[in-house]
Image: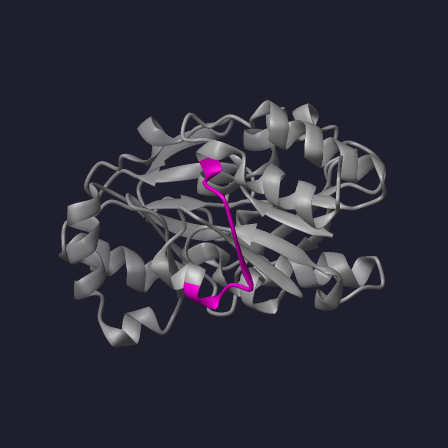
Amino acid sequence: MVALDLDGTLLTSDKTISKKNEKILKQIHQDGIKVVLCTGRPINAIWPYIKQLGLTTENDYTITFNGALVVHNADKAELFKSGMAKTDFEPLYRFADEVYAPLDLLDFEQVYSISDLKKSKYQEQFKGNIKFTSSTFANLGTDKLYSKGIVCDNPSLLDNFSKDIPAKLARRYHIVRSQPQIMEFLAPKMDKTVGLKALLKHFGWNFSNLMAFGDSQNDLGMLVHAQLGVAMENGTEEIRAISSAIAGNNDDDGVGNYLKSFFSIR
């Protein structure tokens, strides 16, 4: 199984899949390698990429919401799901209010922009198909599961926000900086590894059957656990340090070139 992060990894800087990456991934998929996109987004938001790569057969799945939901691509049925209650986000909401920070909460279908806090930049920079609804925190439903919280702001402001998070609050979540302007608050042990473990188990496999590609903090778990964790040349220093191998730049067919060499594709 080949697991692929999107932004900064499979996608170029203009959010496209290069022709070479597309060709190589389609070839290994046809040869029986399972190609799995791993993202923090919902499946509808990345559906054009799934269709472009032809990942719509009965054996194709996607890891979404950074591991909290595994989706069967052919019919979008849920193979695995894990979320948090509204009460789990109350401490984060109170802290955001205290330091004048924005907050968005995602269930498994849409984004709730918390309207009684600073205005979020998440909707204006989000790429893909998902519904955004404005709501006060008090009016959020208590009868549903939420996948994660998002704090989206200018990178310099997010740097300061990160430094100010109290240790007691930080222990309540798995916090990852998925992009310079985005910080994600997940369940304490949630990352892409969780969804991949469930998917590998579905096929009767384990992490010895996994090759994973990534570039940033929210990819760290799957790169560490995979039999072969491959960091992108443009990845963070932390990610490159823990990886088994380094692929080329995401804007220079890094994924495709690495796979072509690894599988001896002519």
Q: Quadrant of the C terminus?
A: top right
Residue 230 in view of the camera: yes
Q: Is residue 128 above or below residue 103?
A: above
Q: x and y percent of residue 26 in the render?
A: 74, 32
Tag count in the figure? 0
Among the 4 quarters of the image, the one containing residue 28 = top right
Among the 4 quarters of the image, the one containing residue 62 = top right
Residue 87 in view of the camera: no
Q: How is the image coloured?
A: one colour
Q: x and y percent of residue 19 in the render?
A: 61, 23
In the displayed structure image, the side of residue 77 where residue 31 appears, left or right = right
Q: Is residue 241 above or below residue 74?
A: below
Q: Is residue 212 magenta?
A: no
72 vs 59, nearest the viewer: 59
Q: Which residues are magenta?
A: 241-250
Q: Residue at x 29, y 70 (%)?
A: 169
Q: Residue at x 49, y 44 (%)?
A: 248
Q: Residue at x 60, y 68 (%)?
A: 225
Q: x and y percent of residue 221 in the render?
A: 53, 64
Q: x and y percent of residue 148 in the render?
A: 45, 52
148 vs 213, nearest the viewer: 213
239 vs 42, nearest the viewer: 239
53 vs 124, nearest the viewer: 53
Q: Residue at x 54, y 34 (%)?
A: 253
